[in-house]
Structure formats: structure tokens, C-alpha cells
């Protein structure tokens, strides 16, 4: 029997869960306690609740509706908080599931967004006799593209023609970005390809050529380690000094409005823009947009049947992943959904 497994990052849902959650996220990285306490304040300001779990519950409900006619049960497991992946596997085993199609809440190739989840799956599955396959990175799937395009067009319709579009995603170490995806360098290339495709469609639909670029956010590593730049706040300040007075921020690197979106964009980047005298608009993430949900449905059915999912541009990435793809930057670990010979 087949099933679908939504695999995500997780987040705290009470004040008491915040510090244990942050320690799990940063385990082995020598992050100072004072840095964790600083980040924890963002959660404490929201009663210890990360938005990500509520967002995933909405997506889970939408996916269950999407797959109801297929007879596919849909489960959910996290890397860093309940519901745990190991518990999801135990539930599937008890229900007689022998093959599961994994869906990551990350649309791009990188260690943290793909291979690390595959490592988590390898650890969580234990002795469960379940085959695990995954849909490939879906940054170029028509459903993901359509959902982002609709949100972007609606937001731009409320901005001026001179607005500057900042596509944003999570910064990662430069070395991790360089080794991402088949052949390397795919993390940045995939974001840029989607942004280019979206802006081409926007130009056709709105008859306006907006200036745009890709920026990064939410850096968390030590200062001596190079991470992807420019940071969104630095770039907003630079644009203001160049006379730009309006920015439209499109977080295409994220599937839902989780903490990095509501804190780092809606709070911090918005404050930077206000300080610089700029108008600030933030495009919604895809969330449980019907086109995105339908796109996940098409990808799952394609992979289940041994076919490549649809794409709006470029080719679908291979699944299982190429051996050694998106390597662990610290210590090699076993990972599922990978060609081994």
C-alpha cells in the first residue's frame, strides 16, 4: 500500500519548547548560548509558537483532499519537533504501508533542503519494511510556478511601475551552495531560473518591465564563514541610497509563512525599508495555494508511476538523487532516496 509523507523542519508550539527546539536545530555547530537566547526572543514574542506547524497543518489538510480519490493516506513528520518522522513511520508500518512518497517543504537543491531530510528519513525509518521514494525539487513545476506568479502579480498590481522586486531565499554557506544539486551550484541557479521565468511572465501579463534581483536572508553562521550575499537589509539600504523608493519582496525560497518570513521579512526587512523611507510590499508564499497543492499531486502521481513530473522550464531533476548530491558539509551520513551504484 502506498502513502504520502510530508517532511518538514518543525517548530516550537509553546514557550517551554523553544530552547530545546533551538538546541536540536543547532546541535554540533557550537552556537553560543547567548545567540540561541537572542533567537529565542523572536519565539517568546509570539508565545513560543512558530507559524510553521499551523501552516503545515493547512497544507496537510489540502493534500489529504487532493489524494482522497487516489486512496493515498497522507502523513506528516518533522526534523526538529513533533510530530516526529520516526512516529510517522511507525504509524505507516502499523497501517500496512509498504511504499511512501516523500514531499519535502523545500523546493530547491541543497544539503539542508534535500539531503539532510534524506538523512533524517534514513535515521527515522529504523527497521520499518517501507520503501521510500521522493518527488524531485519542484522549483520549476507548473503548480509552484503558477502559485508564485499569481501572488507576485497581485502584489505588483498594488505597487508602482518603478518598484524594485527582491526575490529572497535563505542564505546558506557559499561552499554548500557550490556543491548543491547535480553538478553543483544549483541552489542559486534554480532560484535565478525561477525568478527569471516569473519576471518574463510578469512582463507579458502586466506590460511592465520591473527591475529585479535575488537576495538572501536569515544568515545564522559564524562571521568567518562566507555565506551567500547580498543580505536583504543591506540591499534595501543600498537601493534607497540609489533613489529607489519602493520594494516588492517575493520569498520564493520558502513554501510557507514561517518564522524566517514573519520575523526576518515582515518585521526586520519591513523596518529597514521604513527607516529608509521606502514603501514595502511582501508577496505571500505558496502555502496551500490550490495550484501548488495540485502540483504536488501531479508530482506524487508521476513518481509513483515511474514518470518524471511536469516542468514549466528546464528538466525535472532525477529521483532518486544522484549519489553524492548535496554532500553533508560536516560528516557523511547514510541517506535514503539516492542512487547507490
Image: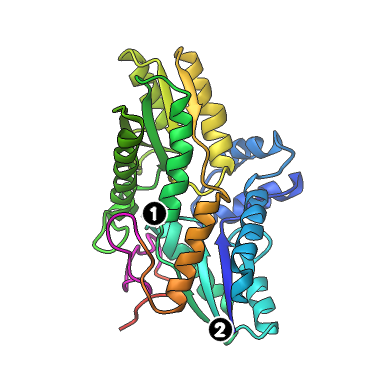
**Residue count near mark 1 (Cα–Cα under 10 Å), binned few <14, some 14–19, many ≥20:** many
**Magenta region, main secondary structure:** loop
The one nearer the camera, 40 or 260, is 260
In the image, residue 209 lies at what x, y percent?
29, 28
- Number of on-image labels: 2
Identify whether 287 is placed above or below 209. Answer: below
Callout 2: SS: loop
Q: Seen from this angle, which residue lies furthest left? A: 183
Q: CA distance from mark 2 to mark 1?
A: 27 Å
Kindly identify which residue carries mark 2.
Answer: 130
In the picture provided, is 268 more to the left or to the right than 82?
left
Instruction: Give me the disc on residue 139.
Output: 1
Residue at x 40%, y 65% (from the top left corner): 136
In the picture provided, is 220 more to the left or to the right than 243?
right
Q: Would residue 222 be seen by someone viewing this image from the given angle?
A: no
Question: In what quadrant of the picture does the N terminus appear?
Answer: bottom right
In the image, residue 38 lies at what x, y percent?
60, 35
Callout 1: SS: loop
Q: Would residue 323 be seen by someone viewing this image from the given angle?
A: yes
Q: Earlier in the sequence, mark 2 or mark 1?
A: 2
Residue at x 68%, y 72% (from the top left corner): 87
In the picture provided, is 336 more to the left or to the right than 62?
left
Magenta stretch in the rendered image: 311-331
> Would you say residue 241 sits in the magenta stretch?
no
In the image, residue 177 lies at what x, y percent?
32, 51
Amino acid at each position: 500500500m502506498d502513502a504520502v509523507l510530508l517532511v518538514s523542519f518543525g517548530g516550537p508550539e509553546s514557550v517551554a519548547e523553544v530552547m530545546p527546539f533551538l538546541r536540536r536545530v543547532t546541535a554540533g555547530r557550537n552556537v553560543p548560548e547567548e545567540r540561541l537566547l537572542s533567537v529565542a526572543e523572536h519565539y517568546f514574542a509570539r508565545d513560543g509558537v512558530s507559524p510553521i506547524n499551523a501552516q503545515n497543518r493547512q497544507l496537510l489538510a489540502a493534500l489529504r483532499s487532493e489524494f482522497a480519490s487516489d486512496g493515498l493516506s497522507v502523513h506528516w513528520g518533522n526534523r526538529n519537533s513533533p510530530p516526529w518522522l520516526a512516529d510517522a513511520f511507525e504509524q505507516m508500518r502499523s497501517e500496512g504501508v509498504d511504499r511512501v512518497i516523500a514531499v519535502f517543504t523545500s523546493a530547491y537543491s541543497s544539503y539542508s533542503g534535500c539531503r539532510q531530510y534524506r538523512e533524517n528519513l534514513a535515521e527515522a525509518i529504523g527497521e520499518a519494511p517501507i520503501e521510500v521514494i521522493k518527488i524531485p525539487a519542484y522549483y520549476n513545476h507548473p503548480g509552484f510556478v503558477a502559485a508564485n506568479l499569481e501572488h507576485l502579480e497581485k502584489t505588483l498590481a498594488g505597487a508602482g511601475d518603478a518598484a524594485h522586486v527582491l526575490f529572497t531565499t535563505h542564505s546558506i554557506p557559499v561552499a554548500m551552495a557550490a556543491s548543491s544539486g547535480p553538478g553543483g551550484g544549483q541552489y542559486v541557479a534554480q532560484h535565478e531560473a525561477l525568478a527569471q521565468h516569473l519576471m518574463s511572465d510578469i512582463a507579458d501579463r502586466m506590460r511592465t518591465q520591473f527591475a529585479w534581483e535575488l537576495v538572501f536572508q536569515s544568515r545564522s553562521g559564524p562571521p568567518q564563514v562566507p555565506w551567500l550575499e547580498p543580505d536583504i537589509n543591506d540591499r534595501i539600504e543600498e537601493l534607497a541610497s540609489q533613489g529607489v523608493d519602493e520594494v516588492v519582496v517575493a520569498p520564493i525560497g520558502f513554501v510557507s509563512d514561517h518564522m524566517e518570513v514573519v520575523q526576518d521579512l515582515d518585521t526586520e526587512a519591513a523596518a529597514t525599508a521604513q527607516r529608509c523611507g521606502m514603501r514595502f510590499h511582501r508577496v505571500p508564499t505558496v502555502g496551500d495555494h490550490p495550484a501548488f497543492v495540485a502540483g504536488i499531486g501531479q508530482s506524487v502521481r508521476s513518481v509513483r508511476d515511474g514518470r518524471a513530473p511536469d516542468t514549466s522550464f528546464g528538466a525535472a531533476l532525477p529521483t532518486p538523487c544522484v549519489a553524492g548530491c548535496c554532500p553533508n558539509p560536516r560528516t557523511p551520513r547514510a541517506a535514503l532516496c539516492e542512487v547507490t551504484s
